[in-house]
Amino acid sequence: MPKRTETLSWDEYFMGLAHLSALRSKDPNTQVGAAIVDENHRVVSVGYNGFPKGCSDDVFPWERKGSVLHTKYVYVVHAELNAILNSPRSVSGCTIYVSLFPCNECAKAIIQSGIRRIVYESDKYADTETTIASKTMLEAAGVEMVRIEKTIRLTVEKIPNTSK
């Protein structure tokens, strides 16, 4: 019998891991995940968007509108930065897989950390000035940007706990 040929590419596989990581986010509107992988296809780190350690997601706001101090935007750590900060080793030379194209702040962290390649899925903010700035910096720094078409979508199905 011949081997199975309809398998995931490495990019599809690791984008699936980014999506799995996004399922940890408690953001009610946008869940973003990231996975950092080295040249040997070994996972170095993962991250998702959420509040910094010690900042309770029951206390800090998830709001999108209102006074800046009453919205999530000044408090949430993005998936890319979480993955970089949570890495147990250098991410220099690695690839980052992220479900949403990185913002300008994450682009700076990606460049400074030495990540050489970004594989992303959604580019829904492509026309915003911050995303244009992000792409400008990434291109200037020689970071490869690859948009992936075929990805793995994950959903969580809650299984009832039958143990007593």
Image: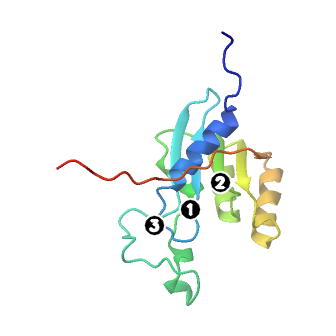
How many numbered tags mark residues here? 3
User: Observer-nearest residue: 53 or 121?
Assistant: 121
User: Observer-nearest residue: 79 or 63?
Assistant: 63
- The location of residue 106, given as percent across then percent down, is 64, 59
Circle 2: element type: strand
- The location of residue 151, given as percent across then percent down, is 68, 45
Question: Which disc, if any, is residue 31?
Answer: 1
Question: Which disc, if any, is residue 154?
Answer: none
Q: Residue sitting at 67 percent across and 39 percent down? A: 12
- Where on the picture, by quarter, is residue 35? top right
Q: Amino acid at mark 3?
A: Phe
Q: Residue sitting at 46 percent across and 65 percent down? A: 26
Give how far apart the Cα atoms at labels 3 and 1 are: 13 Å
Could you tell whether 67 is left or right of 123 in the image?
left
Q: Residue sitting at 57 percent across and 53 percent down? A: 33
Q: Is residue 114 above or below residue 68?
A: above
Give how far apart the Cα atoms at labels 2 and 1 are: 9 Å
Question: Which disc, if any, is residue 51?
Answer: 3
Query: Do we see residue 92 in this rendering?
Result: no
Q: Is residue 64 above or below residue 160?
A: below
Circle 3: element type: loop
Query: Do we see residue 131 in this rendering?
Result: yes
Looking at marks 2 and 1 on the same chain, the residue that comes earlier in the sequence is marked by 1
Q: Is residue 162 above or below residue 13?
A: below
Question: Which disc, if any, is residue 99?
Answer: 2
Color style of the picture: rainbow
Give how far apart the Cα atoms at labels 3 and 2 are: 18 Å
